[in-house]
């Protein structure tokens, strides 16, 4: 089979696209030589079985238990282990290394996506903060806690751009935008790895899922991806490259195919782009069982051929299906893979271990036994203040009429809804080793913040869903959703009585965390009917209604927006989520989060996102015309646009002033606005810069995010925010996949969301 994509020749023209000239992480260049010499020497001593053993990334499970893994470590058959997460467990495994012939330690990895013991907001929530400091804090603390558990690697960050909220994994990524996600990719990698991934408090980052997993057709999990090369390079690839440029030690290969060829056997992706063009020197790992998946994709006849294809395409390690272990030796004997193919992969694995410091001290992260915590889940191991602070930055105020929020700290407040007191859900999916018992729910957070100043009443009001099929699905791997056995109407009646006794109702509704996870695509992204019935009954009480949303994807909220007085988007906000939400509800913290993904009015509008290309018949809301691009049965445009989010104060933004109306490669220009806090309380906001290349050789987005800055303003205070625009910011991949700018007119937009902007323009000479 020819895995060389038709675009293989074009890729040679693809130049570096990172505009993030910031610090990276990785081992110092002068150590590379020393490392390579060490590895060359070690490899001379290795048998073919020992080499193949290094390519085996194993997971603990019912079919492969700890004792069996330990025996395989002694036999030199294990390169890395994942899903073992406590120091004592890892130490027991690591102690086996002494009994192996060459004493090459495995590394220990885990899916630490938004925290290890202390859980931070889900990635989509982190993205909603647009706060690089907060994101860096979350990654740094994740690394500290991960390393403190004896682990060396995280399968994170997940930087798949996605414009389809039906896909459950939108919760795990940073949303729809290329620029925002690229900035976050950089922060996450440098946060995890620190200056040097071998530091005892650092872990190696393994960026995923390369490539384009977020573009699965119809948002259906594991589905096909088919995409034009210009969209691929302009919109979807930059975040992976940003992670690679930041020094990510590993890249995980996606489960999907890309234009017909599975990523796992895609030489074009893995060699031509990743290695040759991007100069990635680290480790590649397959996703779970993806090598065997090549047979099901229909590109390999059997597992044996799949193993050969993956290795030859450039997949170094085989995650969880032992295809390399089973077949590589025979494939080598039959000449179907070469010694060089195997050696190349082994070299990458050993280099990653060298970079993690494991050849200097294989107990690098474990430390001495005396350092093992007496209680792995001890409170003292958590970072609660940081989690609360980061979670506050992630909350997005979607609506606030009549200053319903902040709530006054007095009177009686009804807290209602199936998510109001759910410890498991507030943590979100992929919550690593976090313990739900340690999470603060909204109800608890409100109790703590209100103290004895007022009265809180609670009623569950509804189950997440009354659809038993959905409950069974969500509980098919572990018991996640526990329904209250009472009749739905009885629960609603109780909630209404509670509401009637109160001054204001806070309804905490949305999705169970498992509804926004791997393998949880939805065809309907509304709040389940059971909860909508509850909201309707609460609305009928006439009490002010505050909807607190907990969800891992954009939802369709047109009706909820109509009936509520205020709406706060809280995602799944982690261990300290309840406190952070209470801080915002009671006004101890003024929200500043902005949506990292467009919220559509209806599922039928998907995909709906900010940086669309223009069409030959654009829709103009001022002059709606039949023969323009639109749906005739719904208001055009999103319910809440990308970059949107309110504050308890108000801001004014001046017109944009440019330092010059022309620029060239040598002379960048600046675009400035004056932002003023025109309200009564201090607050932060995110000032956003968008650009449009008005006429180019290919159609360019009508408004592309190119920079942003978070600012804090006291009441009455104003600040000038200045963005530098240079020629690199104007480059894009053209139809020859050449990354270059084109002279002509550019529009500049600055605002506090993607729609409400001030506009001007300049010429690139
Ligand atoms: C997921 C990856 C994850 C891996 C290991 C796979 O099913 O797609 O994101 O890292 O499992 O848990």
Image (cartoon, rainbow, N blue to C red):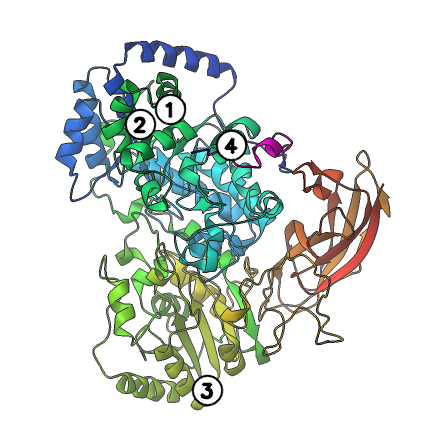
Real-space Cα distance between discs 2 and 4? Answer: 19 Å
The crowd level at tag 2 (other Cα within 10 Å; few <14, some 14-19, many 20+) is many
Select label 1 or label 3 by which is in front. 1
Q: Label 3, on which residue?
A: 543
Pointer 4 and pointer 3: residues touching (CB < 8 Å)? no
Q: Decide if residue 155 is on the left or right side of residue 59.
A: right
Rendered image: mark on residue 144? none
Q: Which residue sits at x=52%, y=70%?
A: 604
Residue 141, image quadrant: top left
Q: Label 1, on which residue?
A: 345
Under circle 1, the secondary element is helix
Could you tell me which quadrant the C terminus lies in?
top right
- Residue 121 in view here: no
Could you tell which of marks 4 and 1 lies nearer the N-terminus?
4
Could you tell which of marks 1 and 3 lies nearer the N-terminus?
1
The crowd level at tag 4 (other Cα within 10 Å; few <14, some 14-19, many 20+) is many
Pointer 2 and pointer 1: residues touching (CB < 8 Å)? yes
The crowd level at tag 1 (other Cα within 10 Å; few <14, some 14-19, many 20+) is many
Under circle 2, the secondary element is loop
Question: What segment carries the magenta color?
Answer: 3-16
Q: Decide if residue 603 is on the left or right side of residue 688.
A: left
Q: Label 2, on which residue?
A: 55
Real-space Cα distance between discs 3 and 2? Answer: 62 Å
Q: Which residue sits at x=70%, y=53%?
A: 690
Could you tell which of marks 2 and 1 lies nearer the N-terminus?
2
Where does residue 215 sit, x and y in percent of width and height?
A: 49, 52
């Amino acid at each position: 089979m020819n895995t060389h994509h038709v675009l293989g020749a074009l890729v040679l023209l693809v130049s570096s696209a990172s505009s993030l000239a910031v610090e990276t992480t990785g081992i110092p260049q002068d150590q590379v030589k020393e490392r390579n010499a060490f590895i060359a020497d070690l490899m001379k001593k290795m048998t073919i079985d020992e080499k193949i053993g290094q390519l085996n990334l194993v997971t603990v499970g019912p079919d492969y238990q700890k004792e069996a893994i330990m025996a395989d470590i002694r036999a030199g058959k294990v390169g890395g282990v994942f899903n073992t997460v406590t120091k004592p467990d890892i130490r027991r495994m690591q102690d086996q290394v002494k009994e192996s012939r060459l004493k090459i330690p495995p590394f220990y990895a885990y899916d630490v996506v938004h925290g290890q013991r202390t859980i931070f907001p889900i990635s989509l929530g982190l993205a909603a903060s647009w706060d690089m400091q907060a994101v860096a804090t979350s990654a740094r603390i994740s690394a500290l806690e991960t390393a403190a558990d004896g682990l060396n690697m995280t399968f994170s960050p997940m930087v798949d751009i996605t414009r389809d909220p039906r896909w459950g994994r939108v919760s795990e990524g940073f949303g729809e935008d290329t620029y925002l996600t690229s900035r976050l990719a950089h922060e996450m990698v440098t946060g995890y790895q620190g200056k040097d991934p071998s530091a005892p408090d650092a872990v190696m980052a393994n960026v995923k899922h390369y490539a384009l997993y977020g573009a699965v057709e119809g948002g259906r999990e594991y589905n096909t991806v088919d995409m034009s090369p210009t969209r691929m390079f302009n919109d979807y690839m930059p975040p992976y490259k940003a992670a690679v440029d930041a020094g990510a030690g590993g890249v995980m290969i996606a489960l999907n195919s890309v234009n017909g060829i599975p990523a796992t056997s895609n030489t074009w992706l893995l060699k031509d782009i990743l290695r040759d063009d991007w100069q990635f020197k680290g480790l590649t790992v397959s996703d779970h069982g993806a090598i065997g998946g090549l047979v099901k994709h229909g590109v390999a006849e059997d597992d044996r051929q799949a193993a050969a294809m993956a290795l030859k395409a450039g997949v170094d390690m085989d995650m969880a299906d032992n295809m390399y272990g089973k077949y590589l030796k025979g494939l080598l004997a039959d000449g179907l893979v070469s010694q060089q193919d195997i050696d190349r992969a082994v070299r990458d694995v050993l280099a990653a271990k060298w970079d993690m410091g494991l050849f200097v001290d294989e107990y690098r992260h474990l430390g001495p036994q005396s350092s093992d915590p007496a209680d792995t889940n001890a409170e003292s191991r958590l970072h609660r203040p940081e989690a609360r602070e980061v979670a506050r930055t992630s909350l997005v105020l979607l609506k606030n009429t009549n200053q319903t929020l902040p709530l006054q700290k007095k009177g009686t407040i009804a807290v209602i809804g199936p998510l109001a007191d759910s410890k498991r859900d507030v943590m979100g999916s992929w919550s690593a080793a976090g313990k739900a018992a340690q999470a603060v729910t909204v109800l608890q957070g409100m109790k703590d913040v209100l103290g004895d100043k007022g009265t809180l009443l609670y009623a569950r009001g509804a189950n997440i869903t009354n659809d038993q099929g959905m409950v069974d699905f969500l509980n098919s791997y572990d018991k996640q959703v526990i329904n209250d056995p009472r009749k739905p109407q009885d629960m609603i009646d109780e909630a209404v009585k509670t509401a009637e006794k109160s001054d204001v109702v806070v309804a905490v509704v949305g999705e169970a965390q498992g509804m926004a996870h791997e393998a949880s695509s939805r065809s309907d992204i509304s709040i389940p009917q059971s909860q909508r019935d509850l909201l309707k009954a609460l609305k009928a009480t006439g009490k002010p209604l505050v909807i607190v949303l907990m969800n891992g994807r954009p939802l369709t909220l047109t009706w909820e927006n109509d009936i509520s007085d205020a709406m706060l988007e809280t995602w799944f906000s982690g261990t300290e989520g309840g406190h952070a939400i209470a801080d915002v509800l009671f006004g101890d913290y003024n929200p500043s989060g902005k949506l990292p993904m467009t919220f559509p009015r209806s599922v039928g509008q998907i995909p709906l996102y900010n940086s669309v290309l223009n069409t030959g018949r654009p829709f103009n809301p001022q002059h709606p015309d039949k023969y323009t691009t639109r749906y005739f049965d719904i208001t055009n445009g999103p319910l809440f646009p990308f970059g949107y989010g309110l504050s308890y104060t108000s801001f004014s933004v001046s017109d944009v002033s440019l330092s010059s109306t022309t620029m060239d490669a040598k002379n960048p220009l600046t675009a400035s606005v004056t932002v003023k806090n025109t309200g009564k309380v201090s607050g932060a906001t995110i000032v956003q810069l968008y650009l449009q290349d008005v006429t180019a050789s290919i159609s360019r987005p009508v408004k592309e995010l190119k920079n942003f800055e978070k600012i804090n303003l006291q009441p009455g205070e104003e600040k000038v925010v200045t963005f530098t625009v240079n020629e690199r910011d104007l480059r894009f991949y053209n139809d020859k996949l050449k990354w270059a700018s084109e002279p002509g007119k550019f529009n500049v937009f600055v605002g506090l969301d993607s729609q409400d902007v001030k506009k001007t323009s300049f010429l690139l000479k």
